[in-house]
Image (cartoon, coloured by chain):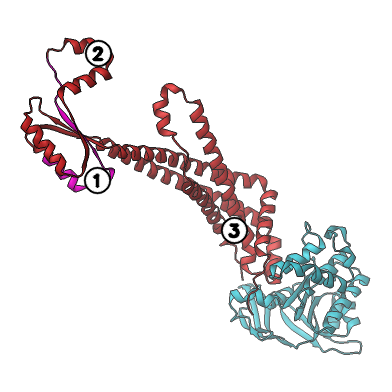
Amino acid sequence: MSQQVPSNTLAYFFREAFRRIWVSKRSSFVAVAMIAISLLIVGIFLLLSENLGRAVTIAQGRSRVEIYLVADASPAQIAAVDRYLAAHRDFVRRRFVSREEALRRFASYFTNLDPVVKQLEGNPFPPSFECDIAPSIVQSAPFGREVKELRATSGVDDVQFDWEWVRRLKRIVNVINIVGLVAGGILALAAAFTIANVIRLTMMLYREEIEIMRLVGATERIIRGPFLMEGLLQGIFGSILALLLLFTAFLLARRLLPPANALVWSFLFNGFLPWQKIVALIAGGMLAGWFGSWLSVRESGEEMA
Amino acid sequence: MIHFYHVTKRFDAYSTALHDVTFHIEKGEFVFLTGPSGAGKSTLLKLILRQIRPTEGQIVVNGRNLLAMKRSQLPYFRREIGMVFQDFKLIERMTIFENLSFILTAIGLPAKEHKKKAYGALRAVDLQHKINYYPLQLSGGEQQRVAIARALINDPLMLIADEPTGNLDPDLAQEVLEIFNDANLRGSTVLLATHDRDLIQRSNRRVIALDHGRIVDEKPATAEKPASRAESLFVNWS
């Protein structure tokens, strides 16, 4: 006999799932809250890593190399470094900063140190070159070789570039991502087990209906569908609640954190999660909900003596 | 239609519900299954629905060997059987229409056909005017008629009833029996498990009597008043 696929099956699953959630409000709330808490924690970590990631991207876009020459570098040595930089395309927009200009900059940046600058007997600042570098090449092996060659060039005292702290920041972002995923994963699993217990209780409540359905020839798909849908809906509600809480916390943090710490919070609360991560969070909630209900319904097959 | 070949059902080493039971019910027959409590009637019905498996022997229902049947085929097999229970098994939170519609959803019938089907089944038991009532607003007899309507709604090949008149007074029991008779006249094979001696005597149908898990008597359908061991069993109990 061929299996009929009724047009109203999905509507029946939804209707029954909503009704059962409503009937078991308290236990459903616990399940939804568990999902929300676990996804909120994942969301906080995602938000942090997202904003740190943005900071990394901005920093990468501004990557700069500074080649400090020895204080008494000869014009020939300066010209040699200039030629080297001109010959390598990785170094774009190079600027020569003379010792005088370096001193002027220092005086203008640190005006409160003006008396100290005036007391200086000579100019302690070395001449240097400043170059921009493309973010994509900073970690490349050729660039590393070029930096090494520059450091070995006559008249060059040191080569500094800001990639080191960017790399550290990236490592932090990775750690935050991993911690968030592990903590969120463990909590989501706990939430799934909570949902499994809630669904198990609901199934106990409806065992007579389930028995009647089996006796009249309902397939397991029809019997289990509303319970799976119930878990799925609890997961969706939980993830939406988590996102609402996260967004509220995000707005409050932006508004309430004191301006004195603006450097910190502007760094951490630059923007909310992109839509892809929002969708991923909702999908995570749905998955946890579905998995929880699946754990229950898979044990619910007809016992046959 | 229903064939039992040397069927034995043991639940454990000390309790054997059925011993070497063999009988055959042909298509279109109306058969009473009778016997005292613990005789094995409910076990036999459960075996037909394949709620349980026999320990020994073979069961063939509507051409299907129940032992060889896959679990996935079970729902489709059960749709061919209408089952009526002594305690009605109506869902109290649902109206009568919803109780019937729920079954149609369970077997995958589109919603637009539910009203027509439910109304037709309720008309067969003369309860169409109570389609929007809740079970607890109905009398016991009415609830049992709804349960029968639910069993009939899918035009089953077989109608199986476990003590359907057990909770009813004699007049209501007769009304319920008439509904089974009508279903039988329309072509359904009926197997009705009952204690009700009067009901069996009035109907003059074939009787299979069980006692301690064995068939102790079989009486063919007859127009005459029955006088058999099945009858004497009743005499002994009363």
B178 w.r.t. A185: above or below? below
> Residue A78: horizontal and vertical position, in percent?
10, 32
> Where, by quadrant of the figure, is residue B183 drawn?
bottom right
> Residue A45: horizontal and vertical position, in percent?
43, 40
A283 w.r.t. A87: above or below? below
Q: Is residue A134 magenta?
A: yes
Element type at mark 2: helix
How far apart are the alpha carbons under marks 2 and 3? 70 Å
A198 w.r.t. B211: above or below? above
| Closer to the camera in the image, B171 or A263 | A263
The chain identifier of the residue carrying mark 2 reads A
Taking A37 as reference, is B233 left or right? right
Residue at the disc numbered 2? A113
> Residue B196: horizontal and vertical position, in percent?
86, 75
Q: Are marks 1 and 3 in contact (CB under 8 Å)?
A: no
User: Which residues lie in the magenta part?
Assistant: A122-149
Residue at (14, 27) in percent of width and height: A127
**Tint of chain A:** red
In primary-sequence order, the first of circles 1 and 2 is: 2
Q: Are marks 1 and 3 on the same chain?
A: yes
Residue at (63, 81) in percent of width and height: B66
Residue at (50, 49) in percent of width and height: A279
Residue at the disc numbered 3? A228
Figure label count:
3
Residue at the disc numbered 1? A137
> Where, by quadrant of the figure, is residue A33 drawn?
top right
How far apart are the alpha carbons under marks 1 and 3? 50 Å
Q: Quadrant of the N terminus of chain A?
A: bottom right
Taking A281 as reference, is B163 left or right? right
Residue A222 visible to an observer of this rendering: yes
